[in-house]
Image (spheres, coloured by chain):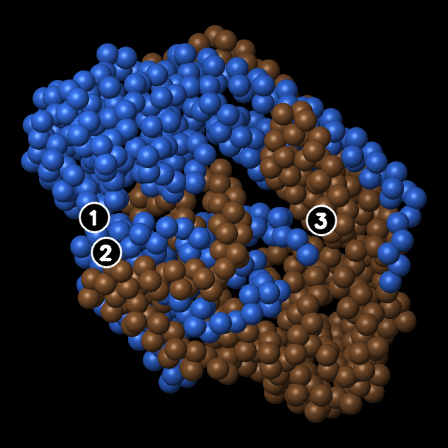
Chain colours: A brown, B blue
Amino acid sequence: MSQQIPAPLDELREKIDNLDSQLIELLAQRLSLVAEVGEVKSTSGIPIYAPEREISLLAKRREEADKAGVGGDLIEDILRRLMRESYHREKDTGFKCLNPELGRVVIIGGAGKLGKIFKKMFLLSGYQVDILEKNDWDKAPSLFKNAGLVVLSVPINITSQIADKLTNLPSDCLLVDLTSTKEKPLNAMLAAHSGPVLGLHPMFGPDIISLAKQVIIYCHGRDAKKYQWLLDQITIWGAKLTMAEPTGHDHAMTLVQAMRHFTTFVYGQHLATENPDMKQLLDFSSPIYRLELAMTGRLFAQDPTLYADIIFSSTSMKEMLSRYLLCFEKASQLIISNDRDGFIEHFNEIAQWFGDSSQQFLIESRNLLMQANDSRQF
Amino acid sequence: MSQQIPAPLDELREKIDNLDSQLIELLAQRLSLVAEVGEVKSTSGIPIYAPEREISLLAKRREEADKAGVGGDLIEDILRRLMRESYHREKDTGFKCLNPELGRVVIIGGAGKLGKIFKKMFLLSGYQVDILEKNDWDKAPSLFKNAGLVVLSVPINITSQIADKLTNLPSDCLLVDLTSTKEKPLNAMLAAHSGPVLGLHPMFGPDIISLAKQVIIYCHGRDAKKYQWLLDQITIWGAKLTMAEPTGHDHAMTLVQAMRHFTTFVYGQHLATENPDMKQLLDFSSPIYRLELAMTGRLFAQDPTLYADIIFSSTSMKEMLSRYLLCFEKASQLIISNDRDGFIEHFNEIAQWFGDSSQQFLIESRNLLMQANDSRQF
């Protein structure tokens, strides 16, 4: 088959290259405008994530693009990618400080990955931040003396015992934790400290670049009006706040986190046991399976203690495990007994449970799988 | 917190809107140039997916973008998205026909989702295509008489029995199947037909828009030189061909397809059993869990028989299931006995098996999770 490049193709590609250079020029201008937007927002304390603005902007451009024969999805994908870049850059311009009268911010475990993120956000917002680590508890009394906010950012399994130590905070000092369970830490904080208490659970990993569009769940502790400023500050950072009641939160997290990570762990363990050739596995991968491999592999590139803490701190995990095992054995039985009809019957029942959301998920995942394939190289 | 929009912000947003209109203009020009490229390629038979061109183009633009302060990742993501659009459009311009002397193409099951895709590709490449469905086997003899290529695109569980019927094809007619297992169908085709035989396994779902960058596994049957034209034709369509040996292929697919779909099935069944509130589940979702939900939900938006066929046709599935169950029970034991150290120990063993690929998967998935978050709306 002829692989020779005909002359007209070279000319066309040259034209495309020139257009791409203009494209870069345009993007540079847009990013500098966005940087100015960041300045204005940070001085006037406007959240960097503006949903309504996004929606109206995208709707207008989609219409315009359709008229120009560009395609709405194309322009939406490109603009969303540009918005992400903008969020990542806006954050560097700093944020308005909503509580300048607050004393110092003390982050216990502030040298950890999650603690570092919050340290940075507080510093970018003009707060004074101190870090307290395992080995300098002797400094604790002096640091706490001037603290307006103490943030607990330590592994789940020691959160409560650290909280127990916090009995001498200033009475108006706000005490906050970032633990991925909420009931126990909140009770420990409320018992140790008589002042305002708030529970936060950031629903993102330590590898995020901006808080824009990231979810943070919060559970009320004590004196809500005394920490409203912090919730507003977090909104300015671009995060989406979701209120939850501690017990309900912890139960949901058994499913959303503990069970999810556990099944990924088992899937990885099974892979390692089967020991297939990774190169062949990738050669044979559909976009879906490659995504599966990536999502499994990413777990094992990270800190095992992090996942151990999430899984072992979940109170209702053992019960859920046995229920999951039942599902697995029920399904296996269908295979062992060659019950194809039974499989289809169960399949349809589950599809009914998903209802309309399965269609929505199909569209959502198709778009993602196309994006995954975009960056595929051979 | 003040949500009022200060005047300077409005002005800046107006400037951004104007830039975005220029952007759309630029994209329109680029797409029309790409359409011309498509014309040239289709007439001269150049594959629509040109890896070297992609790599060199992206490298140049990354460098240019870095100089302009735009950021290499940003321009690469945008250009990759543009390339996808281009592939999707190039396909409509048609493809060079590499075997104009070939008789008619008969697709058995050509009205099915996968059959339709290949029917379209053959038509776009100037071949004459006939469809043969269950109810018109009386037409079969006349259709086969002039057939240069017969494509088997029927459910796995009946592929072999249909193949057995194909004993009267012209001796030089090429017989090809699209089944996701390869050993049995190939043997059946080789037994029924004395002419050239080829086994294909397209590694993509029926919801793809273009074959560009999609993987198609092929297994040699008989008279390789008589079907080289078809492999070349598929390359022109933009797909990536990977050669496999039937038994090895089928064994790998138990892991890549059957087991993957089965675990997703179980995960969905468990969700339906736990019956959480979907709205709350989404509110509480980290980007990772939302992706998990989407990948699980998408399964149940599709045809159960498709997945039943893949799972139940896999020969070594039962053995693998029992090995998987062992992994699951071993891991559960760690939880039940609160063996946190044992969990971490196993975790590190699995991480060792993944080796460097886990880091690569971490980067790959991080990028995907950011893309998933881009389209998130609150």
Label pair 1/3, CB-CB below 8 angstroms: no
Marks 2 and 3, how far apart at CA: 47 Å
Q: Amino acid at mark 2?
A: Phe
Disc number for residue B312 = 2
Across and down, in percent, residue A9 comes to 49, 13
> Same chain for the residues at labels 2 and 3, yes or no?
no
Disc number for residue A87 = 3
Disc 1 designates what residue?
Answer: B157
Check the residue under mark 2 and report the chain it is in: B
| Camera-side residue of B8 and B133 | B133
Quarter of the image for residue B322 reads: bottom left
Category of crowding for the residue at label 1, using alpha-carbon neighbours closer than 10 angstroms: few (below 14), some (14–19), many (at least 20): some
Q: Which residue is at 82% across, 34% downward?
A: B15
Check the residue under mark 3 and report the chain it is in: A
Q: Which residue is at 41% across, 12% downward?
A: B43
Q: Does residue B299 appear anywhere in the picture? A: yes
